[in-house]
Amino acid sequence: MKIELQRALSDEDLLQYPCDCLVVGIAAEEGGASQTLLTSIDQASDGLLARLRSERELPRKAGQTLLLHAVAGVAARRLLLVGLQDVGTDDAIRFQKAARAAAAAIMGSRAVSIAWMVGNTSDRLMLSVLALQEADYRCDHYRKVEENPLERTACLFTATDDVSTQRRVAEAVAIAHGVALARDLGNAPANVCTPTYLGDAAKALAQHSACEVEVLGREEIGKLGMGAFLAVARGSAEPPQLIVVNYRGGQDGSAPIALVGKGVTFDSGGISIKPAEAMDEMKYDMGGAASVLGALHACVELKLPINVVGVIAACENMPGGNALKPGDVIRSLSGKTIEVLNTDAEGRLILCDALTYVQQRFSPALTIDLATLTGACVVALGNVHSGLYANDDTLATQLMAAGTKVGDRAWRMPLDDDYQEQLKSSIADVANLGGRTGGSITAACFLSRFVEGKWAHMDIAGTAWKGGANKGGTGRPVSLLAQFLVDAAAPV
Ligand code: BES
Ligand code: MN
Ligand code: ZN
């Protein structure tokens, strides 16, 4: 979808504005910008809106919409009314709900040219663009396509079209592109999206001059001493890839922000094999890697004046004659040994080496890792919040704030030392399993053993994709990450 920005027209001009769909919010406050437009529409249509109101047919709350055709006095072919009455000025989440409902109603119609009058604060512009692009997303690469999708254009009407408004829309568009990239990668089946495919997706970012991409294979990963990463990859015929994206938009010598992603392109569980039910969904186990690439994509598109390094550990977790076995003791890049009690707890094994690697090589200012790490996190937080762990309160607050702003929510989880007890091993420095309770927390505690300095970990097992009949990648938490990078580039 094409996104355009236009200064608001007078109500009269809007009534005359030729397009397929005029989208107007119905807010609570009397006399607001859309209120006078609604009054004009009502007058032009001989009291249609008043009639609908008295019949209680007008949408009121976030999520309610009403699509009208051929409204008298309105040049637009359709009028889409959007309930906003329960949406407070700073209520990003309810606004997101309203914007998503409006976007879905548009996609359910044949409307191609859209005039979007809903919300013109900087945050609402962002949420509008994200909702529109999210609804417009399709994944048709794996079907025989019968019909070409409609090429839509949404024109956002704002009170001002000054430089900062234009910039905000550019940010929104770039973030939406990053989200779509992550969704594409997530949706790609594991026979297409192999570790090598992720490496190629990263290399595509290197077309931009400030971006360097290196991809290391099995032998080089072994030579580096990444024994834990290599151990997981051993059961698969697909070669593992260590993907390093070095984006240098900032000053030379300024320490980068490091993003580290779990890129398990298929997680069968390995020798501790998973049950068959819904195992297909384990193609999404590279959601962390996808979100690193999505955030970097936005960063590159916006030419953010910061340094960011992305490191992705990509491999398959498969059973095989050569595979890692329960009880094996392996040596990580950090030198710490790990007793593998369950080969299905593989994400932490590849991540611990990636974390050590990024710290040794880049001494980052801070590190954020992203991983579809535990089913326990899905049990704890469902599909609403990503689990957020951090050893630094400021970093946690900044990430949560970025997420709230763009409607990509995270919930902070504890990292108390008491949980570390569960990772004791009778033979090695640490076990890769913490027992039945607190599974997302003990996984985070495992990772914490391999980091120094400011660090956050996001367990995105519940948010990176949605399951069921309409299963698919969500592109989360690309918008949270990208907004965090945008904020880091322009400290307030
Ligand atoms: N990729 C899974 C986590 C996962 C499970 C994500 C279900 C989404 C839905 C991860 O590698 C895994 O298998 N974790 C195990 C850890 C356990 C063996 C300690 C889990 O959560 O069951
Ligand atoms: Mn697993
Ligand atoms: Zn996994």
Image: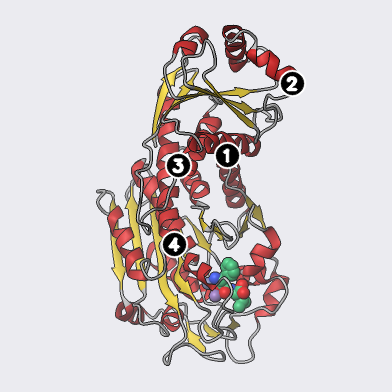
Residue 299 in picture, x, y percent from top left: 39, 46
Quarter containing the N terminus: top left
Disc 3 from disc 4: Cα separation: 23 Å
Q: Residues within 10 Å of mark 2 (few under 14, many from 20)?
A: few
Could you tell me the amino acid type at mark 3?
Answer: Asp
Give the side of residue 196 with respect to residue 128, left or right: left
Q: Quadrant of residue 144?
A: bottom left
| In this view, the mark in front (4 or 2) | 2
Of the numbered discs 1 and 2, the one sitting upstream in the chain is: 2
Could you tell me the amino acid type at mark 1?
Answer: Lys
Q: Nearer the viewer, residue 358 or 62?
A: 62
Q: Are marks 4 and 2 in contact (CB under 8 Å)?
A: no
Residue 337 in picture, x, y percent from top left: 52, 85
Residue 190 in picture, x, y percent from top left: 41, 69
Relative vertical location of residue 181 with respect to residue 76 in this rendering, above or below: below
Secondary structure of the residue carrying tag 3 is helix
Query: Mark 2 = which residue?
Result: 55
Give the side of residue 207 with respect to residue 225, left or right: left
Q: Nearer the viewer, residue 228 or 257?
A: 228
Query: Mark 4 = which residue?
Result: 289
Of the numbered discs 4 and 1, the one sitting upstream in the chain is: 4
Q: Residues within 10 Å of mark 4 (few under 14, many from 20)?
A: many
Picture quadrant of ligand 2: bottom right
Query: Mark 3 = which residue?
Result: 136
The yes-or-no answer for disc 3 within 8 Å of ligand 1 is no
